[in-house]
């Protein structure tokens, strides 16, 4: 199967490239020896998703239909299983009410929600490219980096958020659905300081 030469953990210059990236951006408070675990997970999932979609015979309708449920759930299941934390502690953003419940260790009525609908903006474009035999690992990775962001909100909040991005969405304002519903999201980097048991920023040594 054809591989695209981008920065993954098996890249021969991976350590040097990642070190430079996080030293320049200042994203790593511990210096240049660690990177966020979510970045490693994203790359690993992107690689697996690319291999999966590239291996499917998209002309076999019975095969594709039989795989449909698994295809729809693959990305979420992969991220959830690879991450060791509780599902509701894996968010990139949290609503104030969700944080209040988490501070009480109350996991009821919480929702693991995709800030950008994954089926339309990640899954469908990747599948269409795979059908045309034009899918690349770089394409998958780019979409995940751009659109795979998770919000932890309550069920009541979830009910008032529209299911789709507005018509004519510019592809940049990721939070437009939440802003329209009046749901304020707090980044995980700030949210962890609001909990008795902080949400840790996981780092991976390089």
Image (cartoon, rainbow, N blue to C red):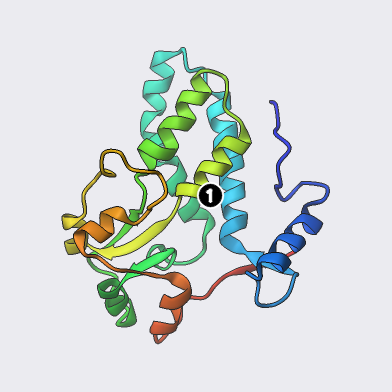
Name the spot of residue 13 as percent of width and height, x first: 82, 51
Quadrant containing the C terminus is: bottom right
Q: Mark 1 points at which residue?
A: 145
Residue at 42%, 66% in the rendered image: 86
Q: Bin the neighbour count of mark 1 within 10 Å (Cα to Cα): few under 14, some 14-19, many 20 and up.
A: few
Name the spot of residue 129 as percent of width and height, x first: 51, 25
Name the spot of residue 47 as percent of width and height, x first: 61, 40
Residue at 56%, 43% in the rendered image: 142
Numbered label tally: 1
Residue 76 relative to residue 22: left or right: left
Residue at 53%, 49% in the rendered image: 145
Residue at 33%, 64% in the rendered image: 152
Residue 125 relative to residue 5: left or right: left
Residue extending furthest toward the bottom: 196
Q: Is residue 43 above or below residue 83?
A: above
Quadrant containing the N terminus is: top right
Residue 112 relative to residue 9: left or right: left
Q: Is mark 1 on a helix, strand or loop?
A: helix
In which quarter of the view is residue 181 placed? Answer: bottom left
Name the spot of residue 30 as percent of width and height, x first: 69, 77
Q: In this view, does 14 lie above or below 187?
A: above
Residue 66 relative to residue 180: left or right: right
């Amino acid at each position: 199967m054809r591989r695209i030469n981008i920065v993954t953990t098996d890249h021969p210059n991976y350590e040097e490239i990642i070190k430079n990236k996080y030293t320049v951006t200042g994203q790593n408070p511990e210096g240049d020896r660690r990177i966020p675990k979510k970045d490693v997970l994203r790359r690993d999932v992107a690689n697996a998703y690319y291999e999966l979609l590239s291996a499917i015979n998209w002309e076999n309708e019975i095969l594709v239909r039989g795989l449909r449920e698994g295809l729809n759930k693959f990305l979420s299941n992969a991220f959830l299983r690879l991450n060791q934390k509780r599902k509701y502690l894996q968010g990139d953003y949290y609503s104030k009410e969700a944080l209040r419940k988490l501070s009480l260790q109350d996991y009821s009525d919480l929702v693991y929600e995709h800030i950008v609908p994954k089926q339309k903006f990640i899954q469908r474009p990747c599948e269409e490219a795979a059908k045309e035999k034009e899918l690349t690992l770089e394409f998958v990775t780019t979409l995940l980096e751009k659109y795979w962001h998770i919000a932890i909100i309550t069920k009541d909040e979830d009910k008032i958020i529209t299911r789709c991005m507005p018509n004519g969405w510019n592809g940049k304002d990721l939070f437009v659905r939440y802003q329209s519903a009046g749901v304020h999201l707090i980044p995980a980097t700030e949210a962890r300081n609001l909990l008795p048991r902080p949400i840790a920023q996981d780092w991976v040594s390089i």
